[in-house]
Amino acid sequence: MSYDRSGLYAKRVATTEPSGPPPERPAGVPRPGRAERITTVPKPGIDFELYRTLSFDLGNDRWNGAPVPRPERNEMTDEKLRVAVIIGSVREGRFGPTVGEWTAAEAERHGDFEVDLVDLAEVELPIDMGGAPATAGAATVAKRPVHERLEAADAFVVVTAEYNRSFPAALKNAIDHHKSEWYAKPVGLVSYGGIAGGLHAVENLRQVFAEVRAMTVRDTVSFQWAAQAFDEEGFPKDRAGSSAAAKTMFDDLSWWAKALKEAKEKRPYER
């Protein structure tokens, strides 16, 4: 029987079961008999010296070989990270606040974050970002409050619906109204929609955030048929599974936020 363990090909070699009655043995000595040995061998083209042989006695449930070393994690500061949870849909009858408020609560529960819930339906950002001086001045005044909130954030979580295989126009307008506020910060993505669960919107957002020098974390939270996925109290019906997915995303977001924050303190990110 063959299978994969930690990127290595592995094979089992079983000894022959001895015949006859089992011999008497002192207490604490494992019963002789069928033992199985797992031997790691390199994948083709990889230096064998990179690997070691590991033994696992299935009958006694213990590793016999040396433990596989794991990279040490750097200790990070315990200071709370500021995360802006952005609700991207502004349509009448939208489902965004339900998903957004749950996401903000999960961020609070995670423990690493101080949460600011930014609802774009409550933010006045004109479509025109230039043109006549009077219009430009109005746009600057309108965006100042949300600018300060985004500037103060160490990380973002964008809660997005999916409209026509992409994300809402109001969300794109908010992204385009700002620039350095996004620089060198991580972005988590929570999506909801129909059968695709908003994932088309997520993939579009990854490209947009890369262009404004932000980085999106790999793991996302996605809700198919969101209106049916939440109960009347505003919680996902699969509370455990949804919370586990959110924790995975927030763990990654926290790591990147701390790493980038520390890097910018040593070497400011300027463009």
Image (tube, grey):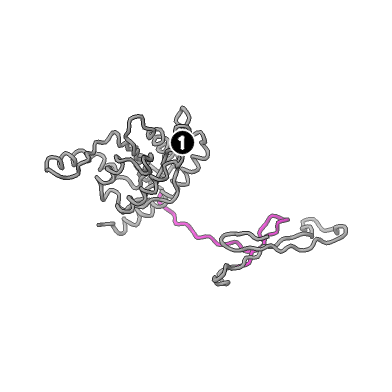
Residue at 36% from the left image edge and 29% from the top image edge = 93
Q: Position of residue 44 (x, y in %)?
A: 57, 69
Report the residue at 39% width, 33% height from top. Answer: 95
Q: Nearer the viewer, residue 197 or 68?
A: 197
Residue drawn at x 85%, y 58% is 22
Name the side, left or right, on which 39 lies relative to 211: right
State yes or no: residue 69 in magenta. Answer: yes
Identify the residue under disc 1.
225
Residue 104's spot in the image, x, y percent?
Answer: 40, 38
Residue 10 lies, with reference to residue 161, above or below; the image says below
Up/down of 34 relative to 235, above or below: below
- Asked if one can make out residue 116 in the rendered structure from this viewpoint, the answer is no
Q: Is residue 259 magenta?
A: no
Nearest the eye: 125 or 243: 125
**Above or below, 75 relative to 10:** above
User: From the viewer's perspective, is 117 left or right of 252?
Assistant: left
Determine whether 14 is above or below 233 in the image: below
The secondary structure that most of the magenta stretch takes on is loop
Occupied quadrant, residue 56: bottom right
> Is residue 81 at all visible to an observer of this figure?
yes
Residue stretch in magenta: 52-77
Few, some or many residues within 10 Å of mark 1 (<14, 14–19, 20+): some
Q: Amino acid at mark 1?
A: Trp
Q: Residue furthest front?
A: 164
The N terminus, quarter of image: bottom right
Q: Residue 268's spot in the image, x, y percent?
A: 28, 57
